Image: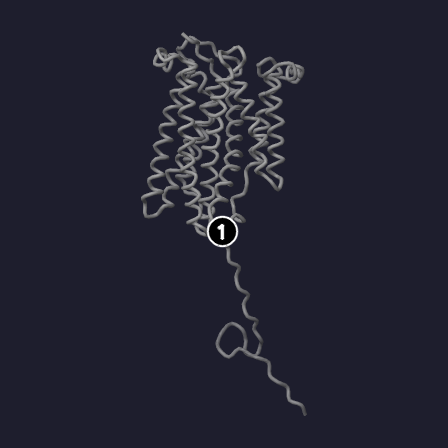
Amino acid sequence: MSSVRPRPTVESGGDAPVGIPVAAPAPSPVSHRAPRRRPSPGRAVAVLVLVAVAALIPLLGPSAALQGTGEAKAPGTVVITFLRAVLFAALSVQVGEVFASRLARRVPGTPLDRAPRGWGSYAAWAGCAAALGLAAIVANGNLVPRELADLDIGRLYDTRDGRLALLEVNAFIAAALCARSRRPSFAALPLSAVIVAEALRAHPPVEDAPLVGSGLTLVHLSCGALWAGGLLYVLRVLRRWRTSAPEQAVAVLGLYARVAAVLFAAITATGVCSTLRRMPPHTVVDQLTGTAYGRTLLAKLLLVAVVAALAVRARRRLRRAADRASAYVPARGEVIALGVVVVVSALLTAVPVPIRW
């Protein structure tokens, strides 16, 4: 008789019965994603407060800014403020994403295959919706339309503001398509067209030296979008890579901080020049408290001062703290304050322009 060779069995104790072969356990996959933490109640409350403030600025901001100034409230100011806030926010998110992703590529060893999911396409469609709403207002003679019969499409082609509104709508559509393509960085071109259109719209030909004003607004808006949107994306990178590539994430934040210093200087210089064009030096003090434009501008300046203080604190932690990643906390406060600045900037475009005394 031929002998049968015994099959390997389990020799020691366990759940498997003796004599039954046991396969080796498969190795568990290694996850590079950071463990997800449940949001704290305090963070949820802070987000709700921020959303409430952002919503209240378009609703109550125009009335508060105009109260006691003797200036007339333009029709549709609340709607225009809201739409411009959405447009500026969408522009900042996508511009900052393109800008910060380029910075991340300059840091050696960054895990670009685990970059944060892009928000560019969502932001572009939100900007397109806001631009469509603003175009509808232009088509109704700068009044908020109540029904489709109020719209006169011919105004969009026959007027300067109408053509600029159409340019913004088409540019956001192109930016959304670029965001879904293999080259999302190509969205920088249509987004630049949006910034140019906004700069031209803010300074009509009847203004003194409109090209100078448009040039200042062009630089101011570009740097502001890069600052706010770039910081948002960098913080998303820092959060995403906090366990898998913490050193690279902090390096991206440091690289952004150096560029942000230049952006802040450009924003400050162009903001001062634009203010002096709107309000001559001998009238600035009076108009900052006596006009809606001046009050809104003063609120924006105070917010920018808070942003600057948070930015300085984050940069100090980035250079001197033992845990450089602790710069995330003040930087997160900085980006939240910048979000409020975006909404206040939208209100600034909707209130009456001060009269030169």
Specify the farthest residue to the bottom.
1
Residue 139: percent from the left, percent from the top?
A: 62, 16
Residue 73: percent from the left, percent from the top?
A: 48, 12
Residue 227 occupies quadrant: top left
- Count the marks: 1
Residue 188 against residue 325 in the figure, above or below: above
Q: Is residue 295 left or right of residue 106?
A: left
Residue 106: percent from the left, percent from the top?
A: 48, 44
Residue at x 66%, y 18% (from the top left corner): 148
Residue 312 occupies quadrant: top left
Query: Which residue is tagged 1?
Result: 33
**Of residues 184 and 294, which is closer to you in this image?**
184
**Of residues 45 and 270, which is closer to you in this image?**
270
**Quarter occupied by the C terminus:** top left
Q: Is residue 307 left or right of residue 215?
A: left
Residue 107 against residue 58 in the figure, above or below: below
**Quarter occupied by the N terminus:** bottom right
Q: Amino acid at mark 1?
A: Arg
**Of residues 112 and 108, which is closer to you in this image?**
108
Query: Circle 1 sits in a helix, a strand or a loop, which is it?
Result: loop
**Label 1 packing within 10 angstroms: few (<14), some (14-19), many (20+):** few
Residue 200: percent from the left, percent from the top?
A: 54, 19
**Of residues 198 and 139, which is closer to you in this image?**
198
Which colour style is shown?
Answer: one colour
